[in-house]
Image (tube, helix red, strand yellow):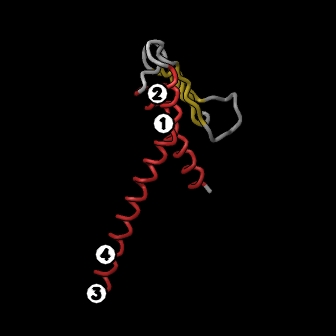
Amino acid sequence: MLIVSLLGLATVIIHELGHYAAARWAGMTVMQVRFGRIEVISQQRGWRVRWSTRQKIRVGGLVSAACDPGRPMRPQVLCLAAGGPLANLVAVAIFVVLAKVWSSAGLRGRRELTGC
């Protein structure tokens, strides 16, 4: 059960970091990133990380960002919205490739041990 919980949290973190990266790439100002009880808040100099006690235990997150007024708003918002799912797709693709490499290396190792 612990492994499933940690994988769920890792998925949420990857998803929210995808939204964050897409917002920054679109030129948006990111004000807050939250996953689970962890809040990362933008300040004038750097970021502040805090553990939120206000909410119930949830697996979820959000990215709060402001659009750049000098650019069209629609492309910025679409980029922000697509960032999370794209990050999850990239992570799944990487894990599938790693699993195939790992399983083929394991099969080769077993063949060498058994002499087949």
- State the image coordinates of residue 49 (x, y, percent, origin top left): 52, 26
Rendered image: mark on residue 108: 4
For marks 4 and 3, the one nearer the N-term is: 4
Q: CA distance from mark 2 to mark 4?
A: 43 Å
Q: Quadrant of the C terminus?
A: bottom left
Tags 2 and 1 in contact by the CB under 8 Å rule?
yes
Left/right placement of residue 25 relative to residue 41 reads left
Q: Which residue is mark 2?
A: 23
Q: CA distance from mark 4 to mark 3?
A: 10 Å
Q: CA distance from mark 2 to mark 1?
A: 8 Å
Q: Residue drawn at (35%, 75%), measured in percent from left and top? A: 107
Kindly state the secondary structure of the residue where label 4 is placed: helix
Q: Which residue is mark 3?
A: 115
Kindly state the secondary structure of the residue where label 2 is placed: helix
Quadrant in which residue 51 is drawn: top right
- Disc 1 marks a residue whose amino acid type is Gly
Q: Which residue is mark 1?
A: 83
